[in-house]
Amino acid sequence: MEKLDRSSSLPEQMQGHWTDLDDPSSELVIAGGEVACFGQTVDYDYKLIGNEDGAVTVSLKINDAANEDDFQRSNVTELVVTPEGEFHAYNTRFASQFVRKEA
């Protein structure tokens, strides 16, 4: 996995405006290194980007170990594009599949 700071862009295939497959009113927006989910910007410090079995993975992390548990519970922290092109976002409390928003 490659460690990159917040200012570095997330992978190209994750960029853009997405809606939850089961709830189109829930949105995920990725613009460069910024991630906004359900109307809230994720305040993270760095990301780990990897490629596992053809899936592109991103883990959003913070440098504050004391607040890691709260961060994991209150933000989207994991992003995955499967080899089939499905986009999933999750944390310790939820998981959602997102589809690109129609213009």
Image (cartoon, grey):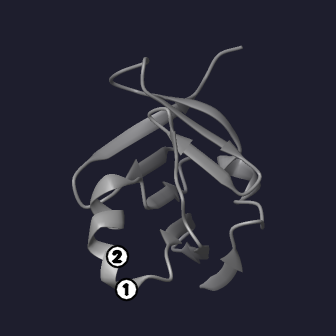
Badge 2 marks a residue whose secondary structure is helix
Residue receiving disc 1: 65
Amino acid type, residue under disc 2 in the picture: Glu
The residue sitting at the left extreme is: 93
Can you say whether 3 is above or below 12 in the image? below
- The residue carrying pointer 1 sits among few (fewer than 14), some (14 to 19) or many (20 or more) residues within 10 Å by Cα, namely few
Q: How far apart are marks 1 and 2 (CA)?
A: 5 Å
Left or right side of 102 for 12: right
> Observer-nearest residue: 41 or 79?
41
Residues at marks 1 and 2 touching, judged by CB atoms closer than 8 Å: yes
> Observer-nearest residue: 28 or 39?
39
Q: Position of residue 92 (x, y in %)?
A: 25, 61
Can you say whether 56 is above or below 89 in the image? below
Residue receiving disc 2: 68
Left or right side of 49 for 66: left
Left or right side of 91 for 101: right
Can you say whether 99 is above or below 13 in the image? above
Residue at x 70% of width, y 75% of height: 5
Residue at x 33% of width, y 24% of height: 22
Amino acid type, residue under disc 1 in the picture: Ala
Q: Position of residue 57 (x, y in %)?
A: 54, 66
Q: Position of residue 42 (x, y in %)?
A: 52, 53
Question: Total marks drawn?
Answer: 2
Q: Position of residue 91 (x, y in %)?
A: 32, 58
Residue at x 66% of width, y 84% of height: 2
Q: Which quadrant, please, contains the C terminus?
A: top right
Find residue 17 and report its image quarter: top right
